[in-house]
Amino acid sequence: MSSERNPTSETTDAPTARPRRLTYAAALCALEALALLAGGLWMLVLGLTGDADRQQAVTGGLTVLLLALLPLLATRGLLLRRSWSRGPAVITQVMALPVAYSLLHADGVAVPAGIALTVVAVGALVLLVNPATTRALGIRGPGRASEGEQR
């Protein structure tokens, strides 16, 4: 028996650990999903209680609730390090930017909401295109599909 240490699963799993940037991107997607769920439920309740145009509020609420599925799926995929998850996450951020722009040009409490949405969307985009995130998701750039085979 030698006194050499055998590599344990802790030391071999270290390179495959999820980068913090990926976790932060997933958290921002989850935050957006929660905001969409809250907004959709609020619109739905307003429509059902009759405080607003009933048909429009119910339809809008259901639409926003369905839209919340996109960042929810992206969050789950990012946490599980699925390569497909970056697409829905990026789409969510790109869709959030025009909404943020319109909130920034509104009055009252919509302006701070627009600032917050802008910060979250831009921050998530930066995290999602980061090379560490791309590597963790196993996404290869154009022309790199057979990079490992050429070496």
Image: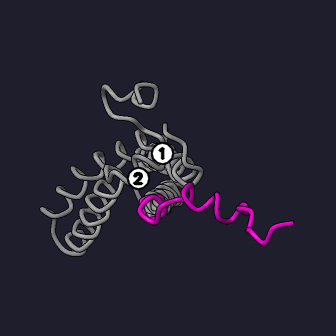
Q: SS for tag 1?
A: loop
* Residues at discs 1 and 2 in contact (Cβ within 8 Å): yes
* Image coords of residue 150 (percent x, y): 40, 25
Query: Label 2: how many residues lie within 10 Å, few (<14), some (14-19) or many (20+)?
Result: many
* Image coords of residue 116 (percent x, y): 28, 70
Q: Amino acid at mark 2?
A: Thr
Task: Verify whether residue 78 appears in magenta.
Answer: no
Mark 1 sits on what residue? Answer: 137
Q: SS for tag 2?
A: helix
* Image coords of residue 118 (percent x, y): 24, 62
Query: Residue 117 versus residue 122: which sits nearer the camera?
Result: 122
Task: Verify whether residue 19 appears in magenta.
Answer: yes
Residue 139 appears in view: yes
Magenta part of the chain:
1-27
Q: Find residue 133 and name its label.
A: 2
Query: Residue 75 versus residue 3: which sits nearer the camera?
Result: 3
If the image is split into quadrants, where does the N terminus sit? bottom right
Q: Find residue 49 and name its label.
A: none
The image quarter in which residue 7 lies: bottom right
The image quarter in which residue 15 lies: bottom right
Query: Up-down: is 48 above or below 84?
Result: below
Q: Residue at x 42, y 47 (%)?
A: 135
Query: Residue 114 versus residue 41: which sits nearer the camera?
Result: 114
The image quarter in which residue 101 lies: bottom left
If the image is split into quadrants, where does the C terminus sit? top left
Q: Residue at x 47, y 55 (%)?
A: 40
